[in-house]
Image: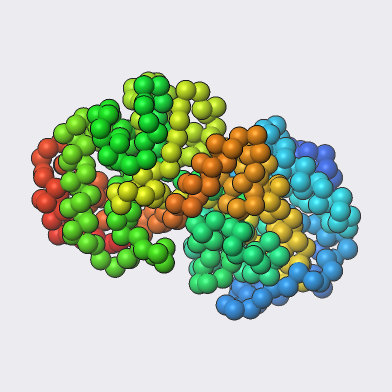
Amino acid sequence: MNANSFFSKLVFCGLCFSFLTGCDSIDHLPDTFRAAATHAPEAHPTETPSAGNLTTPTPAGAVITSSATPDPAQVLTVWLPPELDPKNNSTASQLFAARLKTFEDQQNHIQIHVRIKNASGTQGMLDTLALTRAVAPLALPSVAVLSYLDLGSAVRQELVYPIDSISSLADGKDWYPYSQDMAHVNQQWYGAPFSGDALVLVYRGDGINITPERWEDILAYGQPVYFPAADANALTILALYQSLEVNENRSINPQELNEDNLVRLFTFYQRGAQRGVFPYSLSQFDRFEQTWAAYNNHQTRWVIAWASDYLKSGNDGSDVIPLPGLNNTPFTLATGSLLVLTEPDPARQAASLQLIDFLTNPDFLSDINQAGGTLPPRISANHYASDTRKKAFVEHVSLSAYVQPVPGTYSDLAKDLNDATNQVIRFRLNAQEAAQSVMDGPQKAP
């Protein structure tokens, strides 16, 4: 090997190491976790995963049991998103840190090492798992918090493993249907639901005589309802369309569009535009953050937003209802996060499964979701003992929620829906013409 080649490889390895470790130094962790990382035992040859274990996940249908005794002085590395970073001193992050410390105390031969990774995007949780698997497999975490939107890709890349055997998942009826759907891939649990979020309708209730339940109630007020009409994923438009398609089996027809239902969708937008409910200016918004900011700046009294935005806001002067569907019943799209098993060594998976089970305790899920302003994905975690109204809202929205399609899997359809909706609210197309334009477009339905 010549000097230039050797130097190039050395630089590449250094860059990879910096990427994997640079943003979460041990010095930034609480003392208990810093000590755990500092005194982690050196890997013993018998504990090193085989090449097969590093490249092949547990076969479909196989069950990982958690009855084995964890290795003495075992270190579990947990990757968390920034909102759970123990050093940021938020209530949610401190609750999570305390929960990990309790697990350490109960399993006194286990130490926990925390690292913080971006939740998504470049250098996010999924990308970093894939890079670590490729260049430093022994640095893979034992457990990670992963977005539902990344779970399918993680399974396809063999970065996560089934967790069907943990006791908290044994009673599927204790998890809201949408949270079960987001945690399953190929009929197996690949994640333990940790938090949820869903689209809702937020409004200022002063001057509202009755609690609106249907779109007819809302259209009657004739006040603008904001949503990002240029959202690249067309989530609001898609939710309203899918509310006409849903059936009792919780399935959405993934193969073809129904022209009659498209006409109903665009007739709704046409009527709303005529009454001033959907002004043409909505086409300038492409993110929910923008329309939520407009609501908080009193540019509108009604806004379609994420439940987490409402729950984190303090709710001053605002009311909220589950997003109404066009079939006169609530229907919304949801997302969330999951605890996933990322430990590739079968001999070390038992302790990781015990930790995931411990972190999905109903009382803990209740506390941390309330602290973080997210929806508890487990029915027995919907406590809100001092706020029965909020408890009822969480129940209502969670039971009306269906997992959103993964962005990028239906880009053509999203663009067609956006274009047609904006043409309708600008009075350039009628409902029938808009429906036909979508039917004629190159759809890739979710």
Which quadrant would residue 280 be assigned to in this image? top left
Pinpoint residue 386: horizontal percent, then vertical percent. Answer: 65, 34
Which quadrant would residue 340 be assigned to in this image? bottom right
Point 48% across, 39% down: residue: 307
| Pick the front one: 274 or 292 | 274
Point 25% across, 32% down: residue: 220
Q: Is residue 180 visible?
A: yes
Point 83% across, 66% down: residue: 70
Q: Is residue 10 visible?
A: no
Pinpoint residue 350: horizontal percent, then vertical percent. Answer: 76, 67
**Screen quadrant of the N terminus:** bottom right
Point 32% across, 65% down: residue: 253
| Pick the front one: 276 or 149 | 276
Identity of the residue furthest to the front in this view: 209
Residue 19, compared with residue 89, is above or below; it is below
Residue 234, compared with residue 1, is above or below; it is above
